[in-house]
Image (cartoon, rainbow, N blue to C red):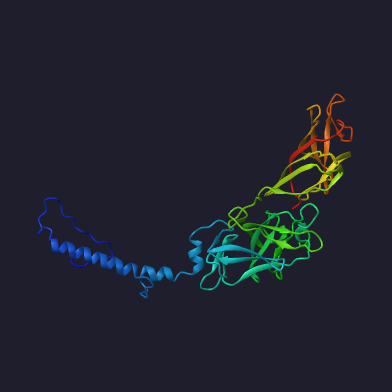
Amino acid sequence: MAMSAYPTSLDTLTNPGASSKLNNPSHSQQHSDANDAIEALEEKVGINGSAVTTSVDYKLSSLPASTKAASYNCPQGFLLNGKLSVTVASNNITVAIKTLAGANPSATDPVYCRIGDTIRTISAALSVTKNAATNWFNAGSAELATKEIDYFAYLGYNSTDGVVIGFARTPNGTQYSSFSVTSTNEFYCAISTISNAVSTDYYEVVGRFAATLSATVSFNWSVPTFTSINLINRPTRETRQLSWTPTFTNLTIGNALIDFKYIWKSTEIIFECGIQFGTTTSMLGAVALSYPVSPINYTATITSGTMVFGHASLRDDSSGSIYPANMAFNGTSSMIVYLANAGSTYLVSATTSNLIPFTWAVNDVIGMHGLYIPNG
C-alpha cells in the first residue's frame, strides 16, 4: 500500500505471518503503511481546538450546546452542569440555579434542563427570593411554624419569559395550573416571574431542599446546614419524614408525650402519630386533630366521619387492653377518631369521651396511622 486511503475508504493492510520474511511483506513498507494510517487518523480526528473544518474535533466543538446536552437523553427535570443554591439573608430566602462550579450560568458556562420534551438553556443568573413577614405556603401556621419542611424546586418555561424558577411544598406540579396563586396557600408556588404565565406552561421538579418558617408575625426564614439528605439536586416527588403539631379538639395535651410524623409522597399523605397521656392531659369528648396538609373535600358527596382513611389503637395502661378505632375525614380542617363499637349485631362507630372506651389516665396511649389524598 503506497499511501493510506483513509478517510476516503478503509485501508487494506497485509499482516505478516509467523514464518514471513522481513522482505515479504516488506518490513519497512509495513512501518510506512502503519505510519500513514496513524497520520490519516490524527488528521481526521484533529487536535484539541482544531481549526480544520473537516476534523471531528472541530465539528463536535461547533455543535450547539443544547444539541450536546440533548445527546445525553436526560429524563425530564434533570440538570446538566447545574445545582440548587438555597441561602437566607436578613431572614429572606433565595433559591437559585448555579453551575456545578458555583457560579451564575452564562453564555460560556450554561446550565441545561429538559422541560417537557425540550432541552432548555439557562445562560444568565436565575433566582427567586421570598422575604420574611408573610405566612408563605401556610408554613408559619400553628401546625408547621418552626418545623423543618421539605420544599420542591421547579423550573418552568414559556416562550416570552423563558426559563423560570420556583419552589413549593407540593411535589405534584407539572404545569402552571397545578399551583395556587395565593401566597399563603399550602399549594402555592413561589415563581421568579409569572408576567406571561399561562395554565399549560410546563413545570419540572429539579430538586428538593429543607427550610423553616418561624411563627407569626415575623415569619422569618432559616435553613439548616445542607447535606445530601436535606438538599437533593435531582427530580424527586417525596419528602423526608417530617413532623407537625396538630390542633386538637376535645383533647387537652398538657404534658403528654406526642410524636406526629408525615410524608408527602406524590399524591398521598402518609401519617403515623401517637399520644401518651401525662398528668395534665385530659380527654373531653370526640377527639379530632388538624392535618399536616389539607385533604380533598369529600363533603359534597360524603358525610363527615364516613370516609375512613386510617386506623387507631386506644390503649388502657392500667389493664393493658387495646381498643381498635378508625381515623375518618371530619371536614377539610380535621380528622376524627372513631371507636369500633361492638354493642350491636354489626360494628358501628362511636366517639370517645373521658370515660369511653375507658377512664383515661396517665400513660394511656392513642396510636394513629393512615393515608389520604391532598387537596392539590
Q: Quadrant of residue 149?
A: bottom right
Q: Where residue 130 sits: x, y (%)?
A: 72, 66
Of residue 64 and residue 48, the one placed in the foreground of this image is 48
Quarter of the image where one finds residue 50? bottom left
**Residue 258 vertical placement versus 21 (above, below):** above
Where does residue 97 sit, x and y in percent of width and height?
60, 66
- Of the 4 image quadrants, the one containing the N terminus is bottom left
Residue 139 at what x, y percent from top left? 76, 57
Can residue 373 be seen here? The reply is: yes
Q: Tell me: 376 left or right of 79.
A: right
Q: Position of residue 111 (x, y in %)?
A: 55, 66
User: Viewer-proximal residue, 131 or 120?
Assistant: 131
Left or right? Give the position of 144 relative to 155: right
Q: Residue furthest top?
A: 345
Left or right of 275, for residue 242: left
The answer to whether residue 84 is left or right of residue 51 is: right
Give the residue at x 74% y 45%: 260
Query: For residue 46, what is the image quadrant?
Result: bottom left
The residue nearer to you, when weighing 167 against 267, is: 167
Q: How many marks?
A: 0
Residue farthest to the front, as pictured: 279
Position above or below: 348 against 8: above
Q: Is residue 4 visible?
A: no
